[in-house]
Image (cartoon, helix red, strand yellow):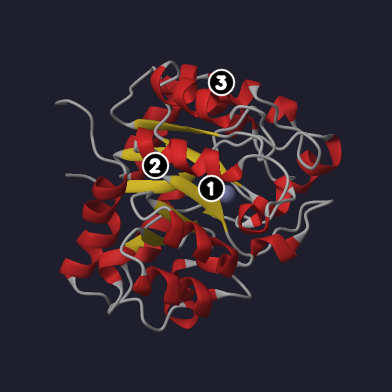
Amino acid sequence: MGVTDCHVHINPFWEMRPDALALLGHRDPATARFVREPKAFLDYLDRSGIDRAVLVNYVAPEVIGYTEATNTFASEFAKADPQRLLATGGIRPDHPDPGSEVRRLSRELGLRAIKLHPPHQLFRPNAYVEGGPGRLAELYGACEREQLPVIFHTGTSIFPRARDRFGDPMFVEDVAIDFPKLTIVLAHGGRPLWMTTATFLARRFPNVWLEVSSIPPARLHDYFPALERLSEKVLFGTDWPGPAVPELRANFDAFRALPLSAEVQRRVLEENPLKVFPSRGSR
Ligand SMILES: [Zn+2]
C-alpha cells in the first residue's frame, strides 16, 4: 500500500481563460513541464513520497475555460501509468445525454471519477429535485451504474466569475439520499464556510467521504475538530498546485507531523483512498 493524493491539478492549463490563469501566478516552468510530461510528474511523485495521484479535471468553459477536451487530456496523461495516475474528468451539468457520455468517459476514456464543480459550473447539485434544467438525475444515476465516484467541489473559490453559493455541501444531501450506491467525495470539506455541514454529511451517509485538500495540514484540526473520530471517512489530498498550496512533499510531511495515531494516518493517507479509488489489476 502507498499514499494517494486524492486531489492534484494536472490540467490542460492552455485552455484556461487569461484572468483565471493569472490567479495561478506562481506556476513555474517545472510545473508546466509536468503537465506535458507524465514521466517527469511520476518522478516528482516519487520524490514526494506519493504513490498515486487523482488527477482532478473538469469541464467549465464559461468560468475557467476547460472544455470537454480536458477529458481526453486526462485520459491520455494517465496512460503513462494507469495504476498511479487516476484520471478524473467532467461533464456539463446540462449535457443532453449524460447517460451515454458517462458511459463513454468510463469505458472508452478509462476515467476513474467525475469531478463536478458547482461554483465554476454554476449549478446546484440537487437542482433535479425541483425539476431544474438538464438531466442531473440521469448523470448521477449513470455514475452510480458505472461505479464512478463523483467528486464535488465544496466550499468557496476565488476565481473570477465563481459563484460560491453553489459550493454549499448541503446541496449534496439530496444526491446522497437519492443515489445511495453512488460514491460521493466532498472535496475541500466545505472550507472555509461549511466544514460543519460537510462533516455532518460524511458522518450521516455511508456513501459520502470528506476530502481535506487545500487546507494547510497544520490547521486541519481547527477546520475539522472531529478528524480522528471521523477518520474512517477522511481522504488526504493537497490541491497542488492551486493558489497558495505548497509542494507535495511539504504538504505530505506536514500531514505526517500531525499528532495523529499511526492507524489514523494510514487510514487517511492509504486505506480510505483505496476504498474510494480501488486499484485495478496487479502492479
Ligand atoms: Zn482543486
Regarding residue 211, the answer to whether it shows in the image is no
- Structural crowding at the residue carrying mark 3, measured as other residues with C-alpha within 10 Å and reported as few (<14), some (14–19) or many (≥20): some
Query: Mark 2 or mark 3: which is in front?
Result: 2
- Kindly identify the amino acid type of the residue bearing the numbered disc 3: Phe
Secondary structure beneath label 1: loop
> Can you identify the residue that label 2 sits on?
144
Residue 231, by quadrant, is: bottom left
View extreme (front): residue: 131
- Structural crowding at the residue carrying mark 1, measured as other residues with C-alpha within 10 Å and reported as few (<14), some (14–19) or many (≥20): some
- Kindly identify the amino acid type of the residue bearing the numbered disc 1: Trp
- Structural crowding at the residue carrying mark 2, measured as other residues with C-alpha within 10 Å and reported as few (<14), some (14–19) or many (≥20): some
Query: Mark 2 or mark 1: which is in front?
Result: 2
- Measured from the top left, where is residue 141 in percent x and y? 45, 41
Tags 2 and 3 in contact by the CB under 8 Å rule? Answer: no
Which comes before the other along the chain, label 2 or label 3?
3
**Left or right of residue 52, residue 237 in this image:** right
Nearer to the camera, 139 or 207:
139
Measured in 3D between alpha carbons, the distance from the residue under mark 3 to the one under mark 1, in whole angstroms, is 18 Å
Q: Residue at (73%, 65%) from the top-left corner?
A: 165
Label 3 residue near ligand 1, CB within 8 Å: no
> Can you identify the residue that label 3 sits on?
73
Q: Which mark is residue 240?
A: 1
Query: Mark 3 or mark 1: which is in front?
Result: 3
Which comes before the other along the chain, label 2 or label 1?
2
Regarding residue 27, the answer to whether it shows in the image is yes
Nearer to the camera, 28 or 84:
84
- Kindly identify the amino acid type of the residue bearing the numbered disc 2: Glu
Secondary structure beneath label 3: helix
Q: Residue at (29%, 61%) from the top-left corner?
A: 268
